[in-house]
Image (spheres, helix red, strand yellow):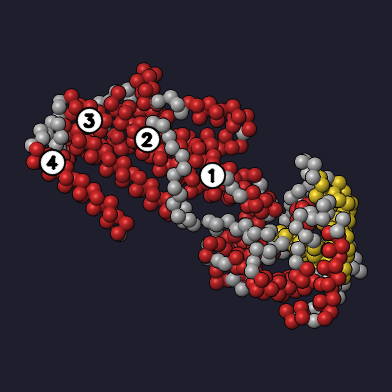
Amino acid sequence: MSRSRPGPDSVEVEGVGKTYASGVQAVRDVSFRVSPGEFVSLLGPSGCGKSTLLMMVAGLLPPSRGGIRVDGRAVTGPRPDVGVVFQSPVLLPWRTVLDNVLLPVEMLRLPRGQHEERARALLAMAGVEEFAGRLPHELSGGMKQRVSLCRALVLQPRLLLMDEPFSALDALTRDRMALELLRIWEQVRPTVLFVTHAIREAVFLSDRVLVMSPRPGTIALETEVKLPRPRSLELQESEEFNRYAGALRRAIEAGDRP
Amino acid sequence: MSRLAWPLGAAALVLAAWEAVVRTLGVLPVVMPAPSAILAVVAGRWPLLLEHLWPTFYQTVLGFLLSVVGGVAIAVLLVYSEPIRRGVLPLLVTSQIVPKVAVAPLLVVWFGIGDLSRLLLAFLIAFFPIVINTVVGLTSVDEDLIRMARAFMGSRAQIFTKVRLPHALPLIFGGMKISITLAVIGIVVAEFVAAQRGLGYLIVMANGLLDTPLMMAAIAVLSAMGLALYGLLAAVERAVVYWQPPAETTAGGTP
């Protein structure tokens, strides 16, 4: 969609591989690019190395081979212009919701005042502003994951990395979270790299889906999802949506067969 | 409040039975005074008891604080330094086999009969549970939390102060609750060995005079002091560790 924009790509992954010290090869020769503002999903069965790949883009894990650049600069470690949402909310239980969202601000020793306003605005956008003063254990799983999304967005990152963020939620909450993620994304517009094993979730959210084949993980197929935005849940019943989902499912099944 | 009613009721029953047995059998006070007689001594000789309570109290508190500061510091060294952990931790654990009470006379030889030798004995007895609980607390943090803190640019120092230490607090408090009772033992034993004041000294002196009611009054006051300190600590714990119920104690010590 925005691939003709000038300047460096948001994410450039080139020939990246990861072999653990144990000798297990998790990722093999993966290359792809993500344009600024684009929503891209990495889709694959569990154990295909997609989370490993995401952690390498986040700078939390060094690749064994190849190079990763974010906004044209090589990734050597975690960086403030990249926000991460993990599989579990990983909130600090002794901090209020607001203080959890402000954790990245504190880590960088930035002034709390102006960021508190932004944190509250994000919580309002995610529909959890009335819980700002509560502790995480008072929140449901879905609400905790919203708080975790606000934390990832508080420093206004240009790139948002999401590692199966809704996989621990029930199906109904999951659908609602996907819808809200899109709503927030359309207001904030960071580039998103979204890891998931749910085909329909990938189609619903993304501009582009990269299918990973397992062991060692590599990109087997790339599909552009040309469904109109803003998207609503009814879209999932459309024929076009199901055509995308069907094609991706067949691609994953083909990759599963040796 | 019914949580308190049951143990209080049970205690009242035991005391009543004790009182009845002493009275009906006519047991001599020098052998076993009745609870009422002990209470009378506590009330009647309160100035004497108070005079000896004070040194025991402040030395217990000092010995305990020394154990907390020293114990947490040793734990941090053990967690963050591989050579210290590999070299010192096994020795530290093995050293707990030494009955520290037996070291008390030696400490007097080395450090004299002043406060210092008593504080050192209290520290030697009370610091270990804090070390072990703090090490467990600092190292049992979920790896996902550490990874999250790293992703949001947390430095090693920030990960310690903002993640590891708060996570360890419930366990540190668990260690402190064991430690405070051990500190009382350390001070009293040190007072048995060499002191001119303190409840431990009073117990030994009353024993020499065959004044069993005074001895038991001193023990009662000592127990009340220990209970009050423990209760105070539990109250502080509830205020500091507000995000979860109090931790059960997980490590013991050998006095």
> Looking at the image, which is closer to me, B41 or B91?
B91
Name which of mark 2 and mark 4 comes first in the sequence: 4
Of circles 2 and 4, the one toward us is 4
Q: Quadrant of the C terminus of chain A?
A: bottom right
Q: Which residue is mark 1?
A: B137
Where is residue A39? Give x, y as percent: 80, 68
Both on one chain, marks 3 and 1?
A: yes
Both on one chain, marks 2 and 4?
A: yes
Where is residue A55? Give x, y as percent: 75, 53
Mark 1 belongs to which amino acid? Gly
Q: Which residue is mark 4?
A: B21
Name which of mark 3 and mark 2 comes first in the sequence: 2
Cα separation, mark 3 vs mark 2, equals: 17 Å
Of circles 1 and 4, the one toward us is 4
Element under label 1?
A: helix
Of circles 3 and 4, the one toward us is 4
> Looking at the image, which is closer to me, B222 or B110?
B222
Name which of mark 3 and mark 1 comes first in the sequence: 1
